[in-house]
Image: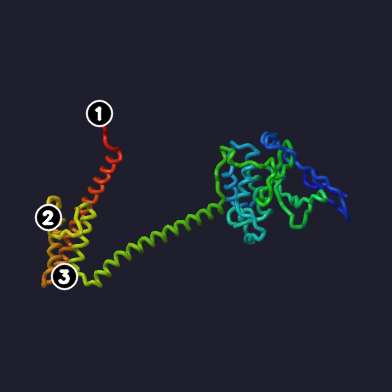
């Protein structure tokens, strides 16, 4: 004994105490081209039943449905895009944590869940399609199972229980689609959404969160590397200071050495064996254009020589005075450094062009 169910009367339930029964299942034999060209008016009874949505459906679910497609797309394109979006949302996992008792299941799955299983994927696809005005329903039953070559039949066990989505096409009726990534997509639905030029490229919130975590991780590694470089630099600087302290180098000598290194870095030539006086004499013409730098170097040199060769050590007030002179001359040294950099850059450009050949 059977009883018709659903408004269109093409589905039936078995009633009564039966041990065996025969069932005929019709498998859609359609192509991508046929579904793409499908049109026609949807029966009002179908629309009334299969476009229903919860009154309290969260706004972000509605907004997502609007973003996924646009008016230029065909009926079929919208179905494929939503199917593919749901399939790529989160990994498949039967141990998925359920939502909070007061949270909408589809909202939870689309925006917060770390994984999902068939009923989550199917429910999400059906709701997104209905928000697009496309009649859809969740179907439950069994996946194909495992084919037995000896018996020529499929072996279907309890763990093959499955849920999928059926979409109504006016020319063909209900057509099955597969939003669950653990299952194969029917041939008529096996279309890459990249083929639709007008399709918006939208990442799921979970994918965006994973990418953001990856970027944070990469940024963390970059920060660690930067801290390592800073640490090495600090170590080098303090290493020089530690050596000076262990060797009991006079502060006047340290001040002179630092200033001389800065001037060499700014472009002045000086060999290691050049004495302080020779260094001043060799660069005398340049120093004449840098009065603050010349005064700072003169005073620093005097204190250096006094600390090295005299029995009368420089006073702390003298050291502070020369430090102040060095600070006042910092702008001149910066201009020297920039000028030297520009000179070297221009020289490299000339060399890159190469010598010009002149023919008479």
Task: Indicate the position of residue 264 as horizontal and vertical percent values.
Answer: 21, 55
Disc 1: CA contacts within 10 A as few (<14), some (14-19) or many (>=20): few
Mark 3 or mark 1: which is in front?
1
Q: Nearer the viewer, residue 113 or 233?
A: 233
In the image, 268 versus 8, the foreground residue is 268
Q: Determine the residue positioned at 12% across, 53% down.
A: 284
Q: Earlier in the sequence, mark 1 or mark 2?
A: 2
Q: Give percent across and percent down for residue 23.
A: 84, 47
Q: Which mark is residue 115?
A: none
| Residue located at (84% from left, 51% from top) | 14
Residue annotated with mark 2: 281
Callout 1 secondary element: loop
Mark on residue 316? Answer: 3
Q: Secondary structure at mark 3?
A: helix
Measured from the top left, where is residue 180 in percent x and y?
A: 66, 51
Mark 2–mark 3 Cα distance, whole angstroms, equals 27 Å
Q: CA distance from mark 1 to mark 2?
A: 45 Å
Determine crowd level at label 2: few under 14, some 14-19, many 20+ residues with C-alpha closer than 10 A. Answer: few
Q: Is residue 269 left or right of residue 61?
A: left
Query: Residue 155, position in %: x, y?
Result: 79, 53
Q: Are marks 3 and 1 in contact (CB under 8 Å)?
A: no
Residue that carries the numbered disc 1 in the rendered image: 359
Mark in front: 2 vs 3: 2
**CA–CA distance between discs 3 and 1?**
68 Å
């Amino acid at each position: 004994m059977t009883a018709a169910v659903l408004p269109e009367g093409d589905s039936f339930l078995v009633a009564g105490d039966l041990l065996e029964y025969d069932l005929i299942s019709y498998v859609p034999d359609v192509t991508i081209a046929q579904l793409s060209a499908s049109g026609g008016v949807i029966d009002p009874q179908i629309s009334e039943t299969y476009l229903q949505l919860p009154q309290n459906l969260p706004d972000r679910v509605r907004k997502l449905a609007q973003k996924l497609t646009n008016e230029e797309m065909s009926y079929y394109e919208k179905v494929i895009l939503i199917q593919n979006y749901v399939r790529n949302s989160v990994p498949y996992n039967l141990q998925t944590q359920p939502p909070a008792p007061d949270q909408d299941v589809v909202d939870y799955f689309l925006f917060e869940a770390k994984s999902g299983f068939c009923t989550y994927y199917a429910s999400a696809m059906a709701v997104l399609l209905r928000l697009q005005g496309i009649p859809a329903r969740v179907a439950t039953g069994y996946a194909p199972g495992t084919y037995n070559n000896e018996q020529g039949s499929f072996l279907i066990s309890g763990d093959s229980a499955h849920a999928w989505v059926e979409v109504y096409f006016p020319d063909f009726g209900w057509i099955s689609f597969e939003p669950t990534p653990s299952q194969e997509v029917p041939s008529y639905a096996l279309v890459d959404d990249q083929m639709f030029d007008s399709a918006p490229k939208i990442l799921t919130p979970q994918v965006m969160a994973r990418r953001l975590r990856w970027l944070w991780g990469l940024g963390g590694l970059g920060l660690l590397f930067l801290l390592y470089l800073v640490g090495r630099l600090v170590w080098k600087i303090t290493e020089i200071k530690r050596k000076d302290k262990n060797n009991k180098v006079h502060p006047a000598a340290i001040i002179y050495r630092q200033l001389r290194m800065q001037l060499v870095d700014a472009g002045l030539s000086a060999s290691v064996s050049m004495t302080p006086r020779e260094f001043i004499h060799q660069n005398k013409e340049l120093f004449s254009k840098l009065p603050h730098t010349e005064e700072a170097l003169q005073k620093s040199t005097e204190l250096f020589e006094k600390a090295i060769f005299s029995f009368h050590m420089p006073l702390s007030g003298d050291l502070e005075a020369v430090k102040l002179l060095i600070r006042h001359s910092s702008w001149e040294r910066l201009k020297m450094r920039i000028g030297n950099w520009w000179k070297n850059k221009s020289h490299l450009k000339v060399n890159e062009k190469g010598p010009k050949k002149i023919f008479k």
